[in-house]
Amino acid sequence: MKKHARPEKLLPETVYDRLFETSQSQRWLVRRHEKLNLLMDSCSNEEEQLFVCDILERFTYIDSESLADSLEELGKKITQDWGCTPQNALIVAMDKSRFADSSSAVAWMIKPVLADLGDWETNVIYKNLTDAIKDVKDGQKIVIIDEFVGSGQTLSGRLKWISEQLVNQGKLVKIFVGTIAAMKICMEKDLTPASDFHSTIWLKQGLNDHYSGSSLTAAVDMMLAMEEKLHPQHNFMKLKKYSLGYKKSQSTYYLENGNPPNNNFPIFWWRMWKTGKRRTALIARV
């Protein structure tokens, strides 16, 4: 945020200086200074404004360079550690729907990385789990890749479903999972069908891993008070389902030019105010 770019409401000097410092460490906020100003304006008091700065400082922002590093790490994990080759493995996005998904984007972006590591061809890199499970051969390996794993519930369910499908088809297949980023809490779910699960970036919860005792209670209460300003429902989504992030996962994560996960605190992406007025979110999400 530029030093002279003040919000419509004059901020307390402590908040203004803190916000400027936060924007220096989180450079992605600079391009969003107008949206950031609106977020500051929506806060009820200085305490909330400083609280938002605390959360923003803990964001893990993946820029293009960081993404390239993560893709290279995943490529090496797949080919070197897991021993996958174009002859013995299929790579597949963790997607089984007809709609656009970030895992499909990662499957596409990892192609040139794999090309540098072996004679990989596009016909062994899938965008849909159903097709990959149908085509994988008995004795082969299947590598599921994704951009982000939050609570782990979706991943756990997909692994169970994949295992059942393979058993029904009479195939013995080793399953591996690789992702750009994952929250540590996902490891609390049953991921045993996977022989290995690798994330290039591990994420902590925005509140639970930074506060304790009465301070944690106060932080949660403050976040819930801020959520009270949001509309309880937008289109098909109900706010209570995403309170503190989906499954209360308290995520603070954003991939450059990506669709931020609903595991993030809704104050950063929810699109409607309680009054019914459309809201300009700090990080837009579809």
Image (cartoon, rainbow, N blue to C red):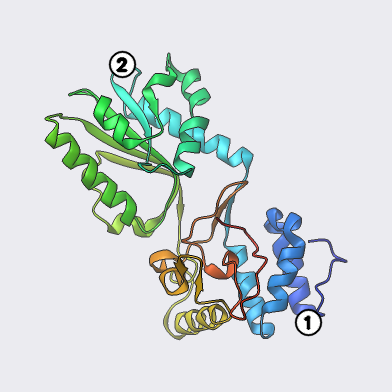
User: Can you say which quadrant of the picture contains the C terminus?
Assistant: bottom right
Q: Is residue 109 above or below residue 60?
A: above
Image position, residue 122 (x, y; %): 44, 20
Residue at image location 46% in from the left, 23% down from the top: 114
Q: Which residue is the site of mark 1? A: 12
Q: Quadrant of residue 18?
A: bottom right
Q: Quadrant of residue 49?
A: bottom right
Q: Secondary structure at mark 1?
A: loop
* The one of 13 and 126 positioned closer to us in this rendering: 126
Instruction: Spot the residue most to the top.
Output: 119
Residue at image location 61% in from the left, 58% down from the top: 284
Image position, residue 69 (x, y; %): 55, 36
Q: Which residue is the site of mark 2? A: 87
Residue at image location 52% in from the left, 31% down from the top: 109
In the displayed structure, does residue 153 sit left or right of residue 223? left
Instruction: Spot the residue most to the right.
Output: 4
Q: Quadrant of residue 226?
A: bottom right
Measured Cα–Cα span from mark 1 to mark 2: 62 Å
Residue at image location 50% in from the left, 19% down from the top: 116
Estimate how packed mark 2 is, as few (under 14), some (14 to 19) or many (20 or more) residues with alpha carbons within 10 Å: few
Estimate how packed mark 1 is, as few (under 14), some (14 to 19) or many (20 or more) residues with alpha carbons within 10 Å: few
Image position, residue 40 (x, y; %): 71, 74
Which is closer to the viewer, label 1 or label 2?
2
Q: Secondary structure at mark 2?
A: loop
Image position, residue 247 (x, y; %): 38, 66
